[in-house]
Image: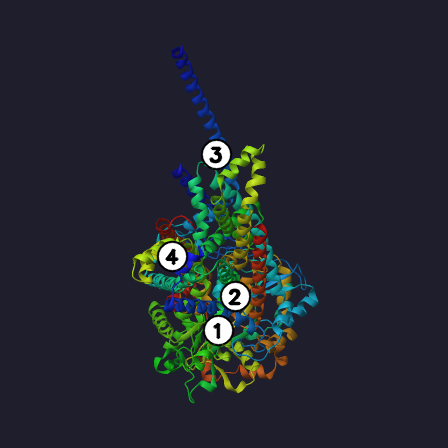
Amino acid sequence: MRTRLLAILALLALLVAACGGASPIEGDAEAPGNGGEDAAAGDDGEATEPAGAGCEEGETDGDIVLYNWTEYMDPELLEKFEEEYGVSVTEDFYPSNEELLARVQGGASGYDVIVPSDYMVSIMIEEGLLLRLDEAAVPNRENISEDFASPPYDPDLAYSMPFQYGTTGLGVNLDEMPDDFPRSWALVFDPEVADQFSGRISLLDDPRETMGAALKYLGYGLNETSDEALQEAADLVSEARNRVAAFTSDQYTDFLVGGETIIGHGFSGTFQFAFVETDNFESWEYFVPEEGGTIWTDNMAVLADSEHPCSSQTFINFILDADNGAQLSNWTYYESPNAAAQDQIDDEVTELADIPDDVAERLEFIEDTGDDEIKFTDYFNRAKG
Amino acid sequence: MSATRDVVRPTGNARRALSANAWLVFAFFYAPIILLVIFSFNDNRFVGVWGGGSLRWYREMFANRPVLNSLQNSLIVAFASTIVSTVLGTFTALALERFRFRGRGAFDGLVYLPVIIPDVTMAVMMLLFFARASSLLYGTMGATFGLGIGTITLSHIAFNISFVAIVVRARLAGMDPSLEEAAADLYAGRWEAFRRVTLPLIMPGILGGALLALTLSLDEVVITSFVSGPGSTTLPVYVFGLVRRGVTPLINAVSTVMLMASMLLVLFSLLVQRRSQ
Amino acid sequence: MAQTTLPPRKADQLEGQAATAELEKSAERAASRRGMFMAAPGFVYLFLFFALPLLIVFVYSFANRSPTGRTILANWNLDSYQRLLDPFVVQIAWRSFVLAAGATAICLLVGYPFAYFIATRSPKVRAALLVLVMIPFWSNFLVRTYAWRMLLGSGGPVSQVTEFLGLGETRLLFTTTAVMIGLVYGYLPFMILPLYASIERVDFSLVEASRDLYASGWQAFRRVTWPLTRPGVVAGSILVFIPSFGAYVTPEILGGSRTTMLGSYIVRQFLQARDWPFGSSLSFVIMLAMLGAAFVYFRVGGKTL
């Protein structure tokens, strides 16, 4: 009786697992709501060109959920949007591109607008996760400056709209630093230099960024995928772990300003935002280390299975408006790829984002490395222990 | 009995050590909570550093939409899951304790599993299940559900049934079976006997189980964070998110309110127990 | 006369016995049916929303993972299980084990005297003390763990106290110690309550007798009280060890992503590494480990949960 029961259960489990459209191909049928367009881009580009949702400018179809990085959207802008279009925006947060991907990969996540960084856009396009944007629905795309209008990860801006860009580097508490400290990744990775800060350092909980920092310090490129290089970088991170107070992508400013850490690894605008809020602005500094670092663009995109594609695109269009784009940059302290917004952005923001030329030369964009992409996550997880 | 107890009360040093230990443990229990409440009135944005007293975080909390929304979700899920799991759990306990039937042993084992299983495993289980179920449903019916309050409630019921069943079973096991036999003799039908004798006797157990289920549901973080969707966050999950994102005394304020609510719940349950005795 | 009536009575008796047996059997079957009927709703629910999900996890643990982290339900393999033997994974499991065992030991060392203290008070005091123990326990688990986060930060209250005592600044946050404190704080009541129940049930006349026999109170304790309370000790230990081993919230809040424990590691497989098969195999195996531990409990400590 018991064995029979077990046999039935096992059979049922296999049935359930096998059904539900689990094709051995890239699981394209796993995501419900992909209907309405063939989103299975697959691996050999055989996909038919997906049709958009057919939205017009200013069209709305219900309230939306924005899945965003923390402290990245001015609440007043959300209120303004609600007033203008009658659509309320709920915000949910994630700390890294990888977690964003994890949450939306399964489909039916309930999110509408997401904010992937450059390389994540190309990954998501390949996975068929993004909705093709309607030209008519986002006319403000014209505001985007030439430099950003044709990015390698989305040349026609068919799926994403860049709306912020910035760099990743180190923020430090000048009061606690020795007088002429090197503005270098050695502050974190070189035991001779870093040991004095032991326990007072935070690193990003982000595979590409943190592994990238190690790779830069070692002299490799950010997108280096050879196993030897990645292992070297992983060893460096693993060794640094003993000096690190925490791996965090959300709280590095809190820790720095709160006194928990002296050196924090994080994003430019977020640091500036926090520094400005303190009453001793001169005690803090953000810089990109001399070996180079990451420059990135953040983009707004709509999930393919969103139930409110029109409201979502209207929101994106709203953010791309010159006034709104400027308001956002003035709030986040990040620069904007929006050409039309430039003269409304405070000088303070652009000045703070300035980087010395020789370092700027060594900035790199993170790129999608295809099949090797998962390596960064794996090596990073091992290094984190 | 108390006379005998006096005999085993340790004397001298042992007694002092025991008392000291007890005091320390109580201090250990309560100090964090008291400090938590005190710092909820901290005017300074940075939690550990006192900056003067103020009510601003409480004001902010009550104006904060996500907080109120997640509180509402917590209550809905807790009450729904408590009611369903109490009913199902009681039936389960009665079946296991009072009847013999085929498959009883297997069912007995199954009921204990949710208690033992680590909550990460359960979280993973439910996520995979709902992922598969929703795509199966989509494939066959063209429409499907997303993660939300429904999936959270279903998951909570799954483990709460076991807890209720265990509590009620304990109560049943401790009952004098002759009472039920007498009832069987007196009343016309089994249902009457059950309603008038068994049910009142196990009611404290049922209520205890229900209270336990309510507490567990309100406390739950891991499973809920896996199977919730946007807008369906519960309060503990929201606080968890806040803690990871940026610690301000707002969390203290929310925590203090939750504390007060729990204490009221405890007092309420004590009163109910007093009444039933 | 009597001899001729005996056989018929015997036949009657046999017939009566057979009839009774028939009746009993049908009553049993009826009771069995009623039992199944009662058990059905709970069973169906648990089967659908517990057994089935568990089996799905089991199935997923043999699946494959695409380069971008999507799960492929084909090319079934044992890779996820092989990874369990990876020294890196073993290290995390060992660390979790040590932390859980440490937390259990501390809870026992602190909780036993505490429970003994309560059990040896007068009934009214006992009841009051128990309620006082329960109150923090009834508050939200997350809230209690967060309280320590607040306490242990640099410049926070704990650090201020040690500075005041001349011990210098302490920065306990994001260390293994912090996680240990969090675990002990969260699960100490789970140790105290079964211990208390067990100690309370001890027949103190036995102890009194042993006091007459043994030289010291300590010996009396060691040879009589302790063995009698062992079921409570086992119950409490299991109730602390199991959740500590698979803990996720406490290490996340107090450990700062530095001390990876099994719970965090599993969640990471789903939320970051996007390796669902491996996360499934980890989840499944940790469940089996806990089942094993619980089985030990049932054997050693008796059936009362």
Residue at numbered disc 4: C233
Within-10-Å neighbours for mark 1: few <14, some 14–19, many 20+: many
Residue C90 image offset from top left, x and y in percent = 33, 61
Label 2 vs 3, first from the N-terminus: 3
> Between residues C271 and B170, which one lies in front from this camera angle?
B170
Marks 3/1: CA distance?
57 Å
State which mark lies toward you, 1 or 4.
Answer: 4
In the displayed orientation, state which residue is furthest to the bottom: A179
Dot 1 falls on a residue whose secondary structure is helix
Three-letter residue code for mark 3: Ser
Say whether marks 3 and 1 touch (CB < 8 Å): no
Q: Amino acid at mark 2?
A: Val
Based on the displayed image, in which of its 4 quarters is residue A56 positioned? bottom right
Residue A254 appears at what percent x and percent y? 51, 76
Name the secondary structure under disc 4. helix
Chain where mark 3 sits = C
Q: Position of residue B216 (x, y in %)?
A: 52, 56
Examine the rendering and report whether any part of residue A20 can be seen: no
Q: Is circle 4 on the same chain as circle 2? A: yes
CA neighbours of label 3 inside 10 A, class few (<14), some (14 to 19), many (20+): some
For marks 1 and 2 on the same chain, the one whose residue lies earlier in the sequence? 2
Q: Which residue is mark 1?
A: C151
Task: Specify whether residue C203 is in view.
Answer: yes
Q: Which mark is residue C32?
A: 3
- Tell me which amino acid carries mark 4: Val
Q: Disc 1 is attached to a residue of which chain? A: C
Both marks 1 and 4 on one chain: yes
Residue C143, numbered circle: 2
